[in-house]
Amino acid sequence: MENPNFILTVEDLSVSFDGFKAVDGLSFYIEPNECRVIIGPNGAGKTTVLDLICGRTRATAGSIEFKGAELTRMREDQIVHAGVGRKFQTPSVYEDLTVFENLEISYPRGHTVFGALTFRRDGDVDARIREVAETIFLGDFLQERAAILSHGQKQWLEIGMLLIQDPQLMMLDEPVAGMSVAERKKTAELLNRIIRDRAVIVIEHDMGFVADIATRVTVMHQGKRLSEGSMAHVQADPKVVEVYLGH
Ligand code: ADP
């Protein structure tokens, strides 16, 4: 289905591991500026979907179209270059570097042209780093080493390291795991800011947090889409209730 309103079109996507269908004929569509939350029981195939979109896992069948490009035929680095950013569950910031330096090394300075790395000299890099640091609530921590940050602040820094690359689609795997209540609230605020300029896909278990951030929710079960719609819609869906009560 080609629809200019969608930034991402996932059609009949499947992947099998040794005959086991982890994702089984899944279709969903993402609009720009939406925050889609994927929920579902453990083993439903949520992480595998993100792995497929970012090129870490190869699809057995189906297609993933992002802004007109077929991602299933692209390498992981090409997918990043096309504008898809992924953050994993555990923060992986450079502990010995400052917040500023972590953001600076993530800034997309160079790109390959006929095999040679070209560097963009941009006087606005500092301003952009400061802007991103403010967005992720770390404006006052620019010169601090990442090692001194709380777990939640490290998660934000990692989101900032993605944000500075300006991806049009950002994917986050359980971004509030291990965060305090106050940090969760601020992360919801952060995501609501982030989607002004891009689409986001989030895997999440914390239903209170899902309610704060989701534009739409996709419920997965056994590799398939079980239900989709607003939080209120999926929560009232008898199929969803059955799956959750069954666990
Ligand atoms: P979720 O994120 O919803 O908990 P996953 O996507 O991690 O689910 O996993 C879905 C299923 O696929 C699980 O049964 C898991 O064991 C299996 N799986 C995922 N990745 C692999 C892999 N690389 N090799 C074999 N099995 C895998």
Image: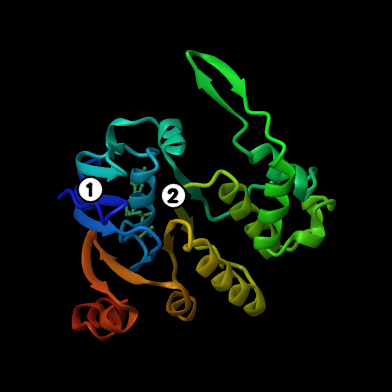
Residue 91 seen in this snapshot: no
Image coordinates of residue 48 in percent, x first then y, are 35, 50
Residue at x 21%, y 47% (from the top left corner) = 14
Query: What is the three-letter code of the residue carrying label 2?
Result: Gln
Horizontal arrangement in the rendering, residue 191 relative to residue 121 (left or right)? left
Task: For mark 1, give the secondary structure.
Answer: strand
Q: Residues within 10 Å of mark 1 (few under 14, many from 20)?
A: few
Residue 120 seen in this snapshot: yes
In the image, is the residue at mark 1 within 8 Å of ligand 1 by its beta carbon?
yes
Residue closest to the far front: 123
Image coordinates of residue 38 in percent, x first then y, are 36, 65
Up-down relation of residue 19 to residue 73 (above or below): below
Residue at x 65%, y 61% (from the top left corner) = 135
Label ID, residue 20 = 1
Residue ID for mark 2: 168
- Label 2 to label 1: alpha-carbon separation: 32 Å
Asked if the residue at tag 1 contacts the one at tag 2, i.e. Cβ–Cβ closer than 8 Å, the answer is: no
Up-down relation of residue 5 to residue 56 (above or below): below
Q: Quadrant of the C terminus?
A: bottom left
